[in-house]
Amino acid sequence: MEGKFFCDPIPSETRAEAHETVDKQKRYRQIIECLSSSEGMTAKEIAVMMMRKGYIPTSERNFTSPRLTEMLKNGVVDIVGKKKCDYTGKTVSVYVLWKGGNDAENG
C-alpha cells in the first residue's frame, strides 16, 4: 500500500508539545486588550487585530479560538450573538468581555 498515509502518534505528541509552549497568560491579556476596545469581535477578527499589533505571525483564528474557549469556560468572556464572518462568510460567535472579566489570570 505504497503512497498511503496511516495514523501516527507523532501528531498528537506534537500537538501536546505545542500546547505547552503557548504562553496562555500572555495570550489571554492580548485577547482582553483587543476585546476591551470593541463592542464584540469574532475569533478571526481578534486574530486579525493581534496580527496587526505584531502579537502573532498570521491572522489564523487558531491563535485565538482555543484561548477564547478557555476564557468562556472561566467567565472572562461571553458570547453575545452570532454574525456572518467578513473573512470566511460563515456564521460565527461574537465575543465580549464579561463584566469584570479583565482578569487574565483566570483565562
Image: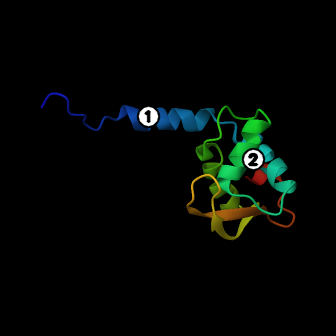
* Residue 74: quarter of image: bottom right
**Looking at this view, is 49 or 20 the one in front?**
49
Which amino acid does the dot numbered 2 rest on? Tyr
Disc 2 vs disc 1: which is toward the camera? 2
**Circle 2 is placed at which residue position?**
28
Badge 1 local density, few (<14 within 10 Å), some, or many (20+)?
few
Quadrant of res 26? top right
Please tell me whether mark 2 sits on a helix, a strand or a loop. Answer: helix
Q: Position of residue 5 (x, y in %)?
A: 25, 34
For mark 1, give the secondary structure.
helix
Give how far across and how far down residue 78 sits, in percent.
73, 66
* Residue found at the very far top of the displayed protein: 2
- Residue 88 percent coordinates (x, y): 57, 54
Decide: is 67 above or below 52. Answer: below
Q: Residue at x 65, y 69 (%)?
A: 82
Q: List the residue tagged with mark 1.
A: 13
